[in-house]
């Protein structure tokens, strides 16, 4: 499914554009796997931004269904007292992950509460015991939060970015404070000095 020639491939290029600041090499490889170029990645980003600002483009999770097709799964979620739905789509670049859009009780037209990559149901979770196990693009926010209990979520430097402060053993085995930076929920980098 696509809208005006904007479909799954273009959506993945749009996601990659926001990751290029951290790992241009990983992004270049992914762009090539999609049979695209850096110019087409920039164009996909430009087109998505224009579409979401257009008055007739669908709102809420419906905008994702317009370009990605029907969601693969729509599991219920609760956030406190709020009953939500997590609409999930498979993306070829990340077969063990799903792009998830969390919407409130009003359904597919409801405002989006969160949008990012999550681990697919039943997909193997990487074994994360030390900071050395945290490889770029190797895990998502929930993987790190579960592996290192007590992780503290924080806003990232842009709407598509997210941070976790957590304590974990470093290369020397000593537990220290760390900050993990994510783009679209996918790990980009870990640095010492989190606020945990």
Image: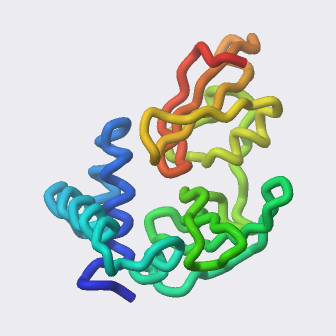
Q: Looking at the rendering, which quadrant does residue 38 occupy?
A: bottom left
Q: Position of residue 167 (x, y in %)?
A: 74, 21
Q: Is residue 146 above or below residue 178?
A: below
Q: Residue furthest left?
A: 39
In the picture as drawn, the residue positioned furthest to the right comes out as 81
Residue closest to the eye, 182 or 189: 182
Residue 22 spot, x, y in % from top left: 37, 36
Please, is residue 151 above or below residue 159 in the view? above
Q: In the drawing, does residue 148 fall left or right of residue 65? A: right
In this rendering, would 162 be left or right of 77? left
Q: Residue at x 70, y 64 (%)?
A: 123
Figure quadrant of the N terminus: bottom left
User: Quadrant location of residue 58?
Assistant: bottom left
Horizontal and vertical percent for residue 20?
Answer: 31, 44
Name the colour scheme: rainbow
Using the image, determine if residue 102 lies above or below residue 171.
below
User: Does residue 178 lie above or below 79 as drawn?
Assistant: above
Q: Position of residue 8 (x, y in %)?
A: 38, 76
- Please name whichever residue, 18 or 123, is drawn nearer the observer in this view of the structure: 18
Q: Give the residue drawn at x 44%, y 33%.
A: 157
Quadrant in which the C terminus is drawn: top right
């Amino acid at each position: 499914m696509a809208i005006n020639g904007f479909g799954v491939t273009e959506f993945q290029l749009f996601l990659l554009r926001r990751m290029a600041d951290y790992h241009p090499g990983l992004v270049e490889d992914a762009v090539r796997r999609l049979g695209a170029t850096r110019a087409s990645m920039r164009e996909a980003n430009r087109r998505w931004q224009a579409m979401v600002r257009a008055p007739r483009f669908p709102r809420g999770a419906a905008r994702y269904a317009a370009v990605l097709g029907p969601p693969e799964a729509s599991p219920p979620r609760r956030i406190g007292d709020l009953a939500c739905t997590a609409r999930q789509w498979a993306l070829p670049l990340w077969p063990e992950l799903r792009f998830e859009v969390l919407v409130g009780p009003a359904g597919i037209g409801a405002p989006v509460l969160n949008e990012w990559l999550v681990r697919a149901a039943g997909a193997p979770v990487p074994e994360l015991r030390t900071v050395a196990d945290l490889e770029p693009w190797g895990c998502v926010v929930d993987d790190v939060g579960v592996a290192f209990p007590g992780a503290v979520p924080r806003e990232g430097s842009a709407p598509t970015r997210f941070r976790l402060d957590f304590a974990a053993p470093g290369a020397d085995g000593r537990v220290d404070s760390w900050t993990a930076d994510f783009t679209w929920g996918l790990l980009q980098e870990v640095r010492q000095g989190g606020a945990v």
